[in-house]
Image: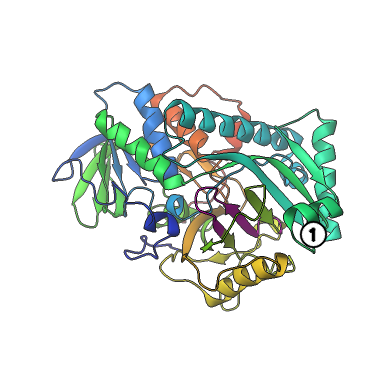
Amino acid sequence: MDPGLPDKYPLPSWWLQNAKNPLSDFQSTPNLPHETDILIIGAGYTGASTAYHLSKMIGKDCQVTVLDARGVAEGATGRNGGHLIPYNHRNILRDVELFGEDYALWRRDLEWANVQEIASFLYDEGIADIAEVQKGDNVMAYCTEESWEIAKQEVAFCKKHNREWGMCEVWEQQEARQRLRSPDVLGAIKIEAYQMFPAKWIWEVFQRLIKANAVQLYTQTPVTAVKSTPTGKWAVHTENKGIIVAKTIIHCTNGWMGHLLPELREVCFPVSEQVMALKMPKQIWKERGFVWHSVAHYLIQRDKDNIVIVGGGRSTIDGKNRPFIDHETMDFLGTGLGGMIRANDSSIYPVLHTDIRQFVRSHFPNEDWPEYEEAEWAGVQGYTKDHLPYIGPLEHAPNQFVSAGYNGHGMPLCWWSGRRVAEMVSGKCNAADDIANIFLPRQRFQLPSA
């Protein structure tokens, strides 16, 4: 499907309601430049990482321009659940079956290293307090015998291969129910993780890049088409500011990538998630982050204000994935990860509202959940048919690159993927046989017939 352009009037997330975006309507110059060397489409998490790493790799005479249909971080980056969670043991047996043992272990090594790098960057650069980073944990709870047994097998597999990615505590039923204050949990596993205010981090990165004259930024500038030119460059058409010609284009549009890249529409999909913020009278748990039902529901508890951010709705409250009535669904590679395929974050669905509300009330029946939400919103994620992101050059379109399709798990990967693409663009990526080449777009989709 063609996701189209991002809606002009999306629902405001709690994050975007509770902080003023300094780059919501920002233009580096009154008019869009006629030409640039490198054009990044998308000013979210991946776009910020790409721009930041390019600034470290290219000369000052190379112009980098960033366009976004909205303000900075007003897409999925400003609408997610606030988690920064490495995979750790989770889904490792699935990845072994689908992609092999080497990939499954490498992916978790990569995400663990990424999370540590992100944390170091935020603290070293003085951004951690700005982004309200919480160093803590994430607990995955299991409510069926089958899922709990698989989880313990996953932990055993990691130990067998001498892999440890920080803390990993296994809670059997009694401990899990006591610590989670939930009567129907059969077991839980706690790992190291972080929570944060993601948009504030990305705003700060872009503001520093602008101050250093490392990028030119134009928000509220939707891109409508990318066309070839006789010179081998690319003419990028915008809805409201004319045309800018670029030597190199990097697509960082995630769930909307199919609009400008129609060849990817059959393999990359916009999938909607719904999230709400609930103000609690006091802190509920010692832990700060949680996922239920194989990440069908997720929540964080903020120390600062006792706000609980809870989202998901991919499953019923008993943990069984179900299709959404009257909406096209897809089972990605048989993983049971259903999802609502749509690129609309301007409305909420009553069925998801009810689902999330039933989730917190049924699993935490003794808590004083408020009658009304502080905010409720939707977000658009990018999912791929083979459950792998697309990171690298588009061979049929010279000097065009893509970094998108994180399958709802972009927070521990986007910073690295931005650097990876920056290395490719700047000629500093020397990894012909790198296992990360599994993410390359080549041979993973078919071009439409002429």
Q: Quadrant of residue 312?
A: bottom right
Q: Secondary structure at mark 1?
A: loop
Residue shown at 39% from the left, 55% from the top: 18
Residue beneath disc 1: 185
Circle 1: residue type: Val
Quadrant including the C terminus: bottom left
Instruction: Judge whether 349 appears above or below 52 on screen.
Output: below
Q: Is residue 450 visible?
A: no
- Most extreme residue toward the left is 30
Q: In screen coordinates, is 159 left or right of 28?
A: right
Residue 334 percent coordinates (x, y): 71, 58
Mark 1 is surrounded, within 10 Å at the Cα level, by few (under 14), some (14 to 19) or many (20 or more) other residues, namely many
Observer-nearest residue: 162 or 224?
162
Q: Is residue 273 magenta?
A: no
Residue 396 percent coordinates (x, y): 43, 42
Colour pattern of the rendering: rainbow
Q: In screen coordinates, is 19 left or right of 437?
A: left
Q: In screen coordinates, is 189 left or right of 242?
A: right
Q: Is residue 151 visible?
A: yes
Residue 19 percent coordinates (x, y): 36, 52
Residue shown at 62% from the left, 50% from the top: 387
Observer-nearest residue: 424 or 40?
40
Instruction: Judge whether 42 appears above or below 425 on screen.
Output: below
Instruction: Judge whether 283 appears above or below 339 on screen.
Output: above
Q: Which residues are magenta?
A: 293-309
Residue 27 percent coordinates (x, y): 20, 45
